[in-house]
Amino acid sequence: MKILITGASSGLGLQLAQDYLLEKHQVFACGRNAEKLANHFQHSDASTLVFDSTNKEQTDATLACVETLDLLILNAGTCRYVDNPMQLDATLFTDVFSTNVTGSLNVLAACLPKMKPGSQLVFISSAASRLPLPRAEAYGASKAAIDYLAQTLEISLVPKGIACSLVQPGFIDTPLTQKNDFPMPWLMSVAEASQKIRRGIARRQRLIRFPWSLHLCFSLLHMLPHSLWASLARQFINRT
Ligand SMILES: NC(=O)c1ccc[n+]([C@@H]2O[C@H](COP(=O)([O-])OP(=O)(O)OC[C@H]3O[C@@H](n4cnc5c(N)ncnc54)[C@H](OP(=O)(O)O)[C@@H]3O)[C@@H](O)[C@H]2O)c1
């Protein structure tokens, strides 16, 4: 398969790229940081593509060299937390949304014409989009936008023969979470997360959720009266 992965210079995207290379697929590994990409992929058959996905011109120009794709994994993302809800910082929201939403859309717009019937689109969202989690106002909202985009495209791309998968992982041990200052239940290794995502993609699953224990917990929390959930969430935030 010809596979393009964004955010392949670090964490989950890097692991997915390395795992697909081991399976002898043709991989386009994308990222902003040329040095990191070169270090990780210099002894591999991957093609590295360096661009900032929030910059549409740069994204279009760099991706022009890709002719066709069987699998596009929109993985590049960032997370910033809101520490004081009384001092909302619009630039924080803009930063998170431009990487997680606009960046994904720029890559998607450039790549969709290269995708033929039978190809697959994969959106890396987050379990955080399932519940209103204090401090994740910007991150959770950006991933909820990705959920909606993936779920609508899943319907509208049927006539084109392009399948969509939405991935909602829990906590994965990557540079993104290594700076977190709170407990991360069911933290998973990046190798295990990659395995679960690749298995879901191979089965053409429309929804790939893991770990199951976290998602079961979230489903149960969803059923609670809102006031009870709000009180639990406030207690959790006060402890951290
Ligand atoms: N880790 C978790 O617990 C977790 C849980 C749920 C969902 N996710 C999602 O999984 C995805 C990967 O996260 P990760 O944990 O692997 O994070 P990470 O290690 O911080 O990697 C983020 C990747 O995104 C790239 N990136 C960021 N901004 C970019 C931009 N403007 N243009 C192009 N590339 C950009 C980075 O490239 P450079 O290094 O080159 O800048 C890097 O390769 C994200 O969408 C994240 O929201 C992660």
Image (cartoon, rainbow, N blue to C red):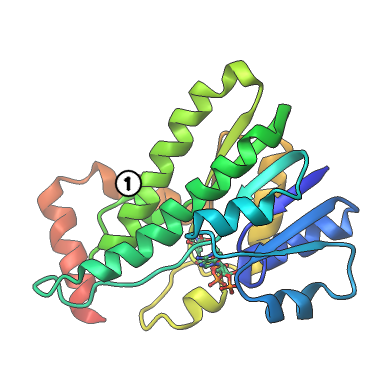
In the displayed structure, does residue 50 sit left or right of residue 103? Answer: right
Q: Is residue 71 above or below residue 8?
A: above
User: Which residue is disc 1 drawn over?
Assistant: 220
Res. 59 image quadrant: bottom right
Give SS at disc 1.
Answer: helix
Q: Amino acid at mark 1?
A: Leu
Q: Is residue 92 above or below residue 145?
A: below
Mark 1, residues whose alpha carbon is within 10 Å: few (<14), some, or many (≥20)?
A: few
Counting labels gives: 1
**The one of 221 and 160 positioned closer to us in this rendering:** 160
**The one of 80 and 222 positioned closer to us in this rendering:** 80
Image coordinates for residue 76, horizontal then vertical, percent: 55, 61
Res. 114 image quadrant: top right
Image coordinates for residue 213, horizontal then vertical, percent: 48, 55
**The one of 203 and 152 positioned closer to us in this rendering:** 152
Image coordinates for residue 142, horizontal then vertical, percent: 36, 54
Going by the picture, which residue comes out furthest to the top? Answer: 159
Q: Is residue 212 above or below residue 236?
A: above
In the displayed structure, does residue 188 sit left or right of residue 36? Answer: left
Q: Is residue 112 above or below residue 25?
A: above
Residue at left offset 63%, top offset 60%: 193
Residue at left offset 56%, top offset 43%: 108
Residue at left offset 19%, top offset 63%: 232
**The one of 214 and 28 positioned closer to us in this rendering:** 28
Residue 166 visible in the displayed image: yes
Residue at left offset 71%, top offset 42%: 71
Quadrant placement of the C terminus: bottom left
Image coordinates for residue 194, horizontal then vertical, percent: 68, 58
Ligand 1 occupies quarter: bottom right
Residue 126 visible in the displayed image: no
Does the numbered disc 1 mark a residue whose Cβ is under 8 Å from ligand 1? Answer: no
